[in-house]
Every structure is written in structure tokens, then in C-alpha cells.
Amino acid sequence: MLPARHLQNVLVGASALLFGGARLAPSHDQSGPVLTAAVSFVSGNPVTPNSAAAASPTGVVAAVTKTALDVFTGAVRPLSRPEALEDAFRSYFAYKTAHPNEVRKPYLYFVDYGLPSTEPRGYVFDMNSLKIVDGPFTVAHGRGSSTTQYGVPTRFSNASGSNASSLGLYVAQSTYDFHGHTAGQSYSSIGLRLMGVSSGFNDNALGRGVVAHGAPYVTSAKAGRSEGCPAMEPSRAARLLPKLADGGMVFLFAPDADWMARDPWLASNAE
């Protein structure tokens, strides 16, 4: 169970999100015990036992996840699996509930690696205003995740030297001057350090040097392969990565059965 001050922060955010979602998705009924309990809690009014139960962290996560899905589902192009966005939003809100001091930015960088690298598969969402900041756009996957230059990645790894992408949830850290090589040429771009928080699946990201960055092998039409980094076009990286830095989040999805069954932030009762 969260300390009272953390639960209050979550309920404040939940109230704002639910009210904001109601304006953006008028067909969704926003009245109910979760919203009532959230408003009662933050206003200092008595909370009934039923409302208090509904306002548990798990209940709030479920409510705000549904609100976000109602808003974004029609605005996002078809994904590789219907559950891709739900998994991303549930993980985001579950982690924010459990670690409110770490999620200091409202931005979520989402990639669907169930789609090929020749299709736009990345988005950045503003999870406070429920708006798409950018996307869809092309994103690279690791060369250890596929045997051909272009296509759908099928292998994911948390191991050093694998050059594979790692699925799951990340907290965005600081930006820095990134330097890379491609086709025998060196290049520079902005880089964004990523701390993997899906234990066993991406928690070696900092040690492996898996970061978000711009790369010349990513264009508007297709993305070449990285060494495991969710790289994007250089101009887009310069625009988006500072927004994500120091407290935004990243979620890399693929229809990988083992990861989907065991990632801790995909559990419905994650707190």
C-alpha cells in the first residue's frame, strides 16, 4: 500500500486525468466510485468504505488506463495487437502510482515492435493532456533482434553484447552528446539515457548503453538497425528527447509471450 501522501498525489492526478478525459471523450461515463473517491480524498471530505476501496492504487490505475484508451484508441493507427496501448498505459500509470517522485514529466514514448521497421511505429503521448505530441514515426530496433535489415524483430534480450532490443518500461534519464557509426561514417546526435524498470527484461539498459538517440539510418520511410536502441530521425530526436528527459517514460512493446506474461508492470495488480 502506498503512503497516504503518495496516494493523494495519485488521486490528484487521477482526478485531473478523468476530468480531462471526460472533455476529450464525451461518450465515456466519467461518474463513478473511483472519481467520487478521488475527489473526496483530495478535498478532505469523508470517503465511504466502498469509495475508499475503489480508490485503491489498483482501482485508480484501471480507471485512468481506461480513460486514456478511450481517448487515444481512435487517434492511433492500427497496431500489431489490440492490447499494445493498454499494456503501455497500464504500465505507465502503475509505475507512476508506485514511484510518483520519479515520473516528473507527462510524456510517454511508445514503440510497437510488432510492426516492421518500414512502418511508422513510434508515438510520444502527453499523458496529462491526453494528446499525441508526435507520431506515428519510424523507429529502429536492434540488429540482434532480426536477421534482416528491415522487417519485424522477433528476438529480444537484456544481455550485454546481444545488440537486441529490450522490451518493457523505462524511465528517461539525462540527455548527452551521442556519437555513433554507421556505414563506415561517424555521426553525432542528442542521446537520452534510459533506466529499464522491467526487471529481468530491460534492467541492464544503462549498463548496455541502450539509449534513445537520433540516427541517420532512420528516415521517414524506414529504419535501419541499431545496437538495441529505439533510435529515431535526428531532427525528431532533437525535438522530442529533451521533452522526455529527466522524468518521462518509454515503453517498448512486442507480442512476445514470455515478456507479456512476466513483465512486472503488466500485472493488473501492480502497485
Image (cartoon, rainbow, N blue to C red):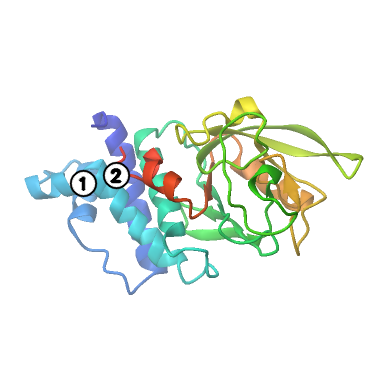
Q: Image quadrant for the C terminus?
A: top left
The label on residue 55 is: 1
Q: What residue did someone put label 2 on?
A: 11
| Amino acid type at image mark 2 | Leu
Compared with 271, 64 (above or below) is below
- Residue at 66% x, 65% y: name it: 119
- Residue for point 81% across, 36% down: 180
Q: Is residue 238 visible?
A: no
The one of 263 and 11 positioned closer to us in this rendering: 263
**Contact, mark 1 vs mark 2 (Cβ under 8 Å):** yes
Q: Position of residue 93 (x, y in %)?
A: 39, 46
Quick one: SS at disc 2? helix
Cα distance in 3D space between marks 1 and 2 = 8 Å
Residue 110 percent coordinates (x, y): 55, 52
Give the secondary structure at mark 1: loop
The quadrant where residue 193 appears = top right
Label 2 crowding class (10 Å Cα cut-off): few <14, some 14-19, many 20+? many
Amino acid at dot 1? Ala
Of callouts 1 and 2, the N-terminal one: 2
